[in-house]
Image (cartoon, helix red, strand yellow):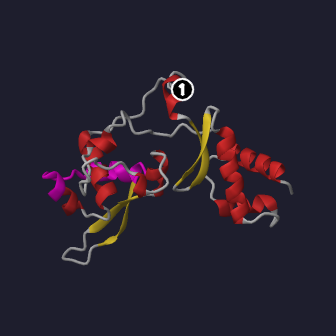
Amino acid sequence: MNTAEAKRILEAALLCAQAPMTVPHLLPLFEDNLTADSIKLILAELQLDWAQGGLDLVCVANGWRFQSKPALKHYLDRLNPEKPPRYSRASLETLAIIAYRQPVTRGDIEDIRGVTVNSLTIKQLEDRGWIEVIGHRETVGRPALFATTKQFLDDLGLASLAQLPINEDGDEMPNLDLLLEQPELPENPETL
């Protein structure tokens, strides 16, 4: 199979996919005619092919997907004037603490914020699929340890936690406003 044909197949599969796709999920498209490394090279070529268009091919935590360019968000918002739900400052602070300090317990979050964490805040973030319990701390009461999910990374368009914004002065934990400066966290990312 030639590269042009493989590129067309990958492009169609990713444009039609309802969720990001990993390279191992894309391999069956080619019935062992291509290796994972070959697919990665073709994906890199596709990224370049689409660089001047209205979509980007990006690799996020759960795999590869097409998404609209950030510069077009203003225009695309006109198609769907309903705004996603706004999250309270407490929810966003809690999410930022979990993202930057994970794994953390509810007590850790309360120590950092200086106030009690409302159970509904944790539930809202869990229901949204942005955080999950990944274990329990080996201490009295065995409190749950929270961490962010791949869905959180996908919704922010990140491939890994290393891509979270950091403070210019190199603080261990950046100013929460860096994560919160996005006017609204997406309910659903603008993908095809």
Q: Residue at x 33, y 44 (%)?
A: 179
Main SS, magenta region, reads helix
Task: Give the answer, above or below, for where 48 lies relative to 32.
Answer: above
Q: Residue furthest front?
A: 169
Tell whether 130 sits left or right of 1.
left
Q: Nearer the viewer, residue 130 or 21?
A: 21
User: Image quadrant of residue 149?
Assistant: bottom left
Q: Is residue 121 magenta?
A: yes
Q: Quadrant of the N terminus?
A: bottom right
Q: Is residue 125 magenta?
A: yes
Label 1 crowd bin: few (<14), some (14–19), many (20+), radius 10 Å? few
User: Image quadrant of residue 68?
Assistant: top right
Q: Residue at x 42, y 33 (%)?
A: 84
Task: Find residue 152 and report its horizontal and vertical position in percent.
Answer: 43, 51
Q: Which residue is mark 1?
A: 76
Q: Residue at x 55, y 34 (%)?
A: 69
Task: Find residue 57 and report its horizontal and vertical position in percent.
Answer: 62, 44
Q: Nearer the viewer, residue 181 or 13?
A: 181
User: Image quadrant of residue 140?
Assistant: bottom left
Q: Quadrant of the C terminus?
A: top right
Q: Residue at x 49, y 54 (%)?
A: 159
Task: Give the answer, above or below, for where 146 lies relative to 53.
Answer: below
The residue tagged with tag 1: helix, strand or loop?
helix
Task: Find residue 156 and report its horizontal and vertical position in percent.
Answer: 45, 45
Q: Nearer the viewer, residue 122 or 9?
A: 9
The magenta segment is 111-130
User: Which residue type does callout 1 highlight?
Assistant: Leu
Residue 19 seen: no
